[in-house]
Image (cartoon, rainbow, N blue to C red):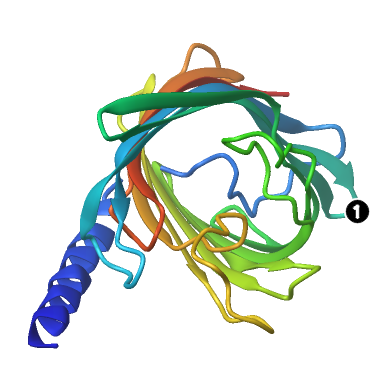
C-alpha cells in the first residue's frame, strides 16, 4: 500500500513537471478551435511507425511495465478541417494500417499480421468565440467502426462511438496554446472514455516551429465490467510528444514527431515516429 502511494506521488510529480515543461513549447493540427472561413481549411497526410515490446500492468494505472508481445504497425493517416461557413467546419480523421503482433512462447515465435482500413472519424465543429488571441468551439464527432475485428491483430474496435468535445485556444505573436477535452461514448455498451489533448507551440524562427502535445485518456464505468482483453473499449494512457515543423511556404509545412507512452493500464507501452506534411488552402 505504501509502495503504491509512493508510486502515485512520483507519477503526479512527474506529470506536473511535464505539463510545465510543455508550456514552453506547438499546437497540433487536429485540435484547433479557430474555425476557418467557408472554403478554407487544411489537411495533414502522414505515415506513422509504432513499436512496443512491453505492456502496462493490467491492475493499476501507472508507469510500471512488464515484458509482453511485440506490437508494430505502420499507419497511413489523413486528418483535416474544411470550413463550411456560418461558423461551421467539417473535421475528419481517416486511417489505414499494417499491424504485426509477435508472441514468443516456449521458444516458439509466432507473428500475425493484418492490413487494411481502420476505424474512421468525422465530425462537425461549431465556433463560439473567434478572436485573434482567443477562440473556443464545440465539436461532435462520430467514430465509425469500419476496421476489421476478425483478423488477429484487429484493425478496428467493432463499436460505433460518439465524441462530443470542447476546444479552447489562446494565441500570441509567436505562440499558441490549445486544449481539447471531452468524452468518447460507445453506443452499444455505454462505456465512456474521458479524453484530453493539450497542445502548445512556439515559432522558433521564420522557418521552424517547435511543438509539443500531451494526450490523456481514462476509461469510465459502464453497465457491466469490461474484460481486460477488450482493447476496443478499455483504453487508459498518458502520452507526451514533441514535433518539429518546417515552413516551405505559408501553405506547405512538412514535419516530424516523436511520441512515447508514459503511463497506462493493461495496454502496450511503446513509442511512435510520425513523418508528415500539412497543407493549408
| Count of labels in the image | 1
- Identify the secondary structure beneath mark 1: loop
Up the image or down, 145 lies above or below 159; here it is: above
Q: Quadrant of the C terminus?
A: top right
Q: Quadrant of the N terminus?
A: bottom left
Q: State whether residue 74 appears in this view.
A: no
**Quarter of the view holding residue 12:** bottom left
The residue closer to the viewer here, 115 or 36, is 115
Residue at image mark 1: 86
Q: Residues within 10 Å of mark 1 (few under 14, many from 20)?
A: few
Q: Position of residue 52 (x, y in %)?
A: 33, 36
The residue closer to the viewer here, 48 or 178, is 48
Up the image or down, 217 lies above or below 174; here it is: below
Q: Position of residue 233 (x, y in %)?
A: 61, 62
Residue at 61% x, 49% y is 32
Up the image or down, 56 lies above or below 53; here it is: below
Q: Residue furthest front?
A: 106
Q: For this view, does 269 lie left or right of residue 235?
A: left
Residue at 57% x, 20% y is 250
The residue closer to the viewer here, 122 or 178, is 122
The residue closer to the viewer here, 96 or 36, is 96
Q: Position of residue 261 (x, y in %)?
A: 33, 48
Q: State whether residue 62 appears in this view.
A: yes
**Quarter of the view holding residue 163:** bottom right
Q: Residue furthest top?
A: 248
Residue at 28% x, 61% y is 19
Residue at 25% x, 28% y is 107
Amino acid at each position: 500500500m505504501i509502495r503504491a502511494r509512493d508510486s502515485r506521488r512520483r507519477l503526479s510529480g512527474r506529470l506536473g513537471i511535464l505539463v510545465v515543461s510543455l508550456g514552453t513549447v506547438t499546437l497540433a493540427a487536429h485540435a484547433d478551435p479557430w474555425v476557418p472561413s467557408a472554403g478554407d481549411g487544411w489537411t495533414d497526410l502522414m505515415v506513422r511507425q509504432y513499436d512496443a515490446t512491453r505492456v502496462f500492468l493490467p491492475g493499476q494505472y501507472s508507469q510500471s511495465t512488464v515484458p509482453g508481445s511485440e506490437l508494430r504497425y505502420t499507419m497511413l493517416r489523413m486528418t483535416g478541417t474544411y470550413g463550411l461557413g456560418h461558423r461551421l467546419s467539417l473535421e475528419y480523421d481517416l486511417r489505414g494500417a499494417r499491424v504485426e503482433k509477435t508472441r514468443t512462447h516456449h521458444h516458439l515465435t509466432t507473428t500475425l499480421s493484418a492490413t487494411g482500413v481502420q476505424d474512421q472519424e468525422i465530425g462537425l465543429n461549431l465556433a463560439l468565440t473567434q478572436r485573434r488571441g482567443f477562440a473556443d468551439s464545440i465539436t461532435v464527432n462520430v467514430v465509425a467502426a469500419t476496421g476489421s475485428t476478425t483478423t488477429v491483430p484487429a484493425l478496428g474496435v467493432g463499436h460505433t462511438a460518439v465524441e462530443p468535445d470542447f476546444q479552447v485556444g489562446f494565441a500570441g505573436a509567436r505562440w499558441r496554446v490549445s486544449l481539447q477535452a471531452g468524452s468518447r461514448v460507445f453506443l452499444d455498451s455505454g462505456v465512456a472514455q474521458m479524453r484530453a489533448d493539450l497542445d502548445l507551440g512556439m515559432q522558433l524562427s521564420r522557418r521552424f516551429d517547435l511543438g509539443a502535445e500531451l494526450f490523456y485518456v481514462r476509461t469510465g464505468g459502464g453497465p457491466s465490467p469490461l474484460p481486460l482483453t477488450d482493447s476496443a473499449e478499455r483504453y487508459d494512457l498518458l502520452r507526451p510528444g514533441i514535433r518539429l515543423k518546417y515552413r516551405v511556404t505559408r501553405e506547405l509545412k512538412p514535419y516530424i514527431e516523436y511520441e512515447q507512452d508514459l503511463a497506462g493500464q493493461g495496454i502496450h507501452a511503446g513509442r511512435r515516429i510520425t513523418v508528415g506534411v500539412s497543407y493549408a488552402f
